[in-house]
Amino acid sequence: ELPDIVSPASASDVLFVLDSAATHSLLSPEASSLLSAKPTGASATASTASAKGIQGGFSQVDLGLPSLTGGYSIGRAPLRPVVMNLPVAPAPPARACGLLGLDFLSRCDVELRLRPAAPLAVFYPPRTADAADAVASAGGDASQVE
């Protein structure tokens, strides 16, 4: 049995895609607003397989220090994604979308449970996935996204 999901109310309004090939996390403008992101004043350039060196319109925002359920800190630096229009539409009930890249994923252990009807991503503090999986199986504390 998996633990209940505990997250800020606004988190349920944002759908995130996990992308281990992306260096940085991205937010749609709507997600940035819903999560009360604060502008850093820095701008960004896009460089992907399909779009190299696209200039302008991308700003970096500060989401603060990320933490997991139970107050587990996952990093010493704030998460600072780039805001841009994303080619992904949020699935209801989400109202906005984002992409979690390696700047977030490298801060925690991620377990993917690929079930046919409801895939699940479970996030653990760094280097604790094995121990945390046993705790989660017993109904303990872990952060998950369905």
Image: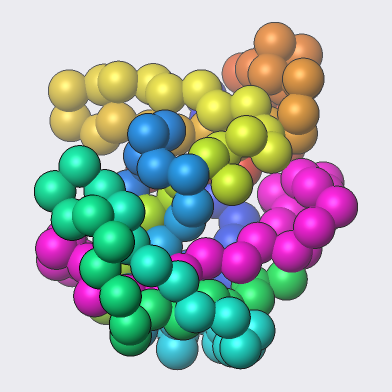
Q: Report the front residue among 46 and 60.
A: 46
Q: Is residue 65 left or right of residue 15?
A: right
Residue ID at (29%, 31%): 119
Q: How is the image coloured?
A: rainbow
**Image quadrant in which you'd find residue 14:** bottom left
Q: Position of residue 43 (x, y in %)?
A: 49, 79
Query: Residue at 53% across / 33% down in the picture?
Result: 122
Q: Identify the residue shown where x is 74% and y is 54%.
A: 67
Residue 132 on image: x %, y %:
72, 21
Quarter of the picture holding the C terminus: top left
Which is more toward the observer, 72 or 102?
102
Q: Is residue 72 left or right of residue 145?
A: right
Is 29 placed left or right of 50 in the picture? Answer: right
In the depicted structure, whether residue 125 falls above or below residue 9: above
How many discs mark residues in the rendered view?
0
Residue 78 located within the stretch drawn in magenta: yes
Majority secondary structure of magenta residues: loop
Residue 145 visible in the displayed image: no
Residue 45: x percent and y percent? 38, 67
Give the residue at x 25% y 34%: 118
The answer to whether residue 27 is above or below residue 38 is above
Q: Is residue 55 visible?
A: yes
Q: Quadrant location of residue 94?
A: bottom left
Q: Give the x, y percent position of residue 28.
A: 32, 75
Q: Magenta segment, which residues?
A: 65-92
Q: Is residue 114 magenta?
A: no
Picture layout, residue 91 above or below residue 111: below
**Front in this rendered view, residue 96 or 104:** 104
